[in-house]
Image: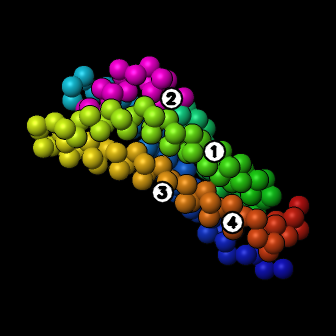
């Protein structure tokens, strides 16, 4: 039985996206922890809303865990191990669930505060707020594309059969 190409492709992509995700989570936390009040309106909104601030820390911690799952999944897939597929599916399911929850949290707590900034006399602040709203909603939706593709390809019969035969 020939190894399905999708196993190797998603093994490599999982490693790449896992490393990039780890860097993104780290950079986001560093930005939140080191930015001075008044320098970033989004961070200011997060600091003023305890629910949003807690969500940011919790989702960052979970994001770090999810990226670790993705990296381990990539290693497992490249080694043609069934556990790599299962970790990938676990990552995808968790990412989609928390992505949907993140869309709700952002829609309820972040977007309304960003809309208020669109009325600013400062065009840079108003434009940044519009970009922030688009990013909060659009980015959340785009962030679910890869996990959906991962589920689709990792549940195909040739992938399941090949990895089962490797045990």
Q: Indicate the quadrant where residue 2 lies.
A: bottom right
The residue identified by callout 1 is 97
Mark 3 → mark 1, Cα distance in angstroms: 14 Å
Mark 3 → mark 4, Cα distance in angstroms: 16 Å
Front residue of this view, candidates 50 and 151: 50
- Give the mark, 3 or 4, whose residue is nearer the N terminus: 3
Range of residues picked out in magenta: 40-58
47 within the magenta span: yes
Q: Residue at x 35, y 50 (%)?
A: 134
In the picture provided, is 125 more to the left or to the right than 155?
Answer: left
Q: Residue at x 67, y 75 (%)?
A: 5
The residue identified by callout 2 is 55
Residue 152: assigned label: 4
- The residue carrying pointer 4 sits among few (fewer than 14), some (14 to 19) or many (20 or more) residues within 10 Å by Cα, namely few
- The percent position of residue 124, horizontal first and vertical second, equals 15, 43
- The percent position of residue 26, horizontal first and vertical second, equals 44, 36
89 within the magenta span: no
């Amino acid at each position: 039985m020939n190894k399905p190409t999708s196993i190797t492709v998603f093994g490599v992509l999982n490693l790449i996206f896992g490393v990039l995700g780890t860097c993104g989570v780290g950079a986001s936390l560093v930005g939140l922890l080191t930015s001075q009040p008044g320098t970033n309106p989004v961070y200011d909104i997060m600091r003023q809303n305890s629910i949003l601030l807690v969500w940011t820390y919790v989702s960052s911690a979970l994001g770090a865990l999810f990226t670790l799952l993705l990296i381990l999944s990539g290693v497992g897939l490249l080694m043609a191990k069934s556990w790599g597929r299962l970790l990938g599916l676990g990552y995808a399911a968790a990412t989609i669930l928390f992505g949907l929850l993140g869309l709700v949290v952002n829609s309820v707590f972040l977007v309304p505060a960003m809309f208020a900034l669109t009325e600013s006399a400062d065009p840079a602040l108003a434009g940044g707020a519009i970009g922030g709203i688009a990013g909060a909603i659009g980015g959340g939706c785009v962030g679910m594309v890869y996990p959906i593709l991962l589920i689709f390809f990792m549940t195909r019969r040739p992938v399941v059969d090949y990895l089962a035969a490797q045990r």
